[in-house]
């Protein structure tokens, strides 16, 4: 059975952001809660690495800038988490669509 879209996204996030393995199925909201502190740390301490990862995963520059300039400071990391998760899910959907042919 093919892993769920979210489970595949979690695997990509683990690879891109060196996240620890997740032992159980997570909802998207639980994943955002788990992922937000990682992004907060990168925003505060390693912004260059965050930029490199966002470039690598092809998170749109406009999306990234919009979050940086429009999000409330205390919501920035979680908004970025949502955007990155959405991007990974989209990439997986596209990959599945074109590899199923």
Image (tube, rainbow, N blue to C red):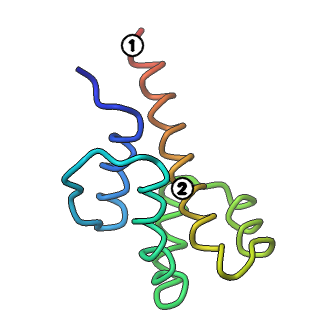
Foreground of the two, 29 or 87: 29
Please say if the residues under marks 1 and 2 sit with CB atoms less than 8 Å apart. no
Single out the residue that lies furthest toward the top. Answer: 101
Single out the residue that lies furthest toward the right. Answer: 70
* Residue pictured at 51% horizontal, 80% vertical: 40
Disc 2: CA contacts within 10 A as few (<14), some (14-19) or many (>=20): many
Residue 73: x %, y % from top left:
70, 82
Disc 1: CA contacts within 10 A as few (<14), some (14-19) or many (>=20): few
* Residue pictured at 57% horizontal, 73% vertical: 77
Vertical position of residue 98 compared to residue 45: above or below: above
Reading the image, the residue beneath label 1 is: 100
For the image, the number of numbered tags is 2
Residue 53: x %, y % from top left:
47, 65
* Residue pictured at 42% horizontal, 56% vertical: 31
- Secondary-structure class at tag 1: loop
Foreground of the two, 5 or 30: 30
* Residue pictured at 29% horizontal, 58% vertical: 15
Vertical position of residue 18 compared to residue 101: above or below: below
Which image quarter is the N terminus in? top left
Counting residues from the start of the chain, the first of labels 1 and 2 encountered is 2
Residue 46: x %, y % from top left:
47, 86
Residue 44: x %, y % from top left:
53, 89
Vertical position of residue 92 compared to residue 42: above or below: above
Reading the image, the residue beneath label 2 is: 84
- Secondary-structure class at tag 2: helix
Single out the residue that lies furthest toward the bottom. Answer: 45
Q: Which mark is residue 1?
A: none
* In-image side of 34 versus 82 (left or right): left
Label 1 to label 2: alpha-carbon separation: 24 Å
Foreground of the two, 67 or 55: 67
Vertical position of residue 43 compared to residue 4: above or below: below
């Amino acid at each position: 059975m093919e892993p769920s879209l979210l489970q595949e996204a979690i695997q990509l996030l683990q690879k891109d952001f060196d996240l620890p393995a997740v032992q159980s199925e997570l909802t998207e909201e639980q994943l955002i809660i788990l992922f937000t502190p990682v992004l907060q740390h990168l925003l505060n301490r390693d912004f260059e690495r965050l930029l490199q990862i966002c470039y690598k995963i092809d998170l749109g520059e406009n999306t990234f800038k919009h979050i940086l300039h429009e999000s409330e400071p205390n919501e920035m990391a979680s908004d970025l988490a949502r955007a990155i998760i959405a991007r990974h899910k989209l990439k997986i959907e596209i990959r599945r669509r074109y590899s199923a042919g």
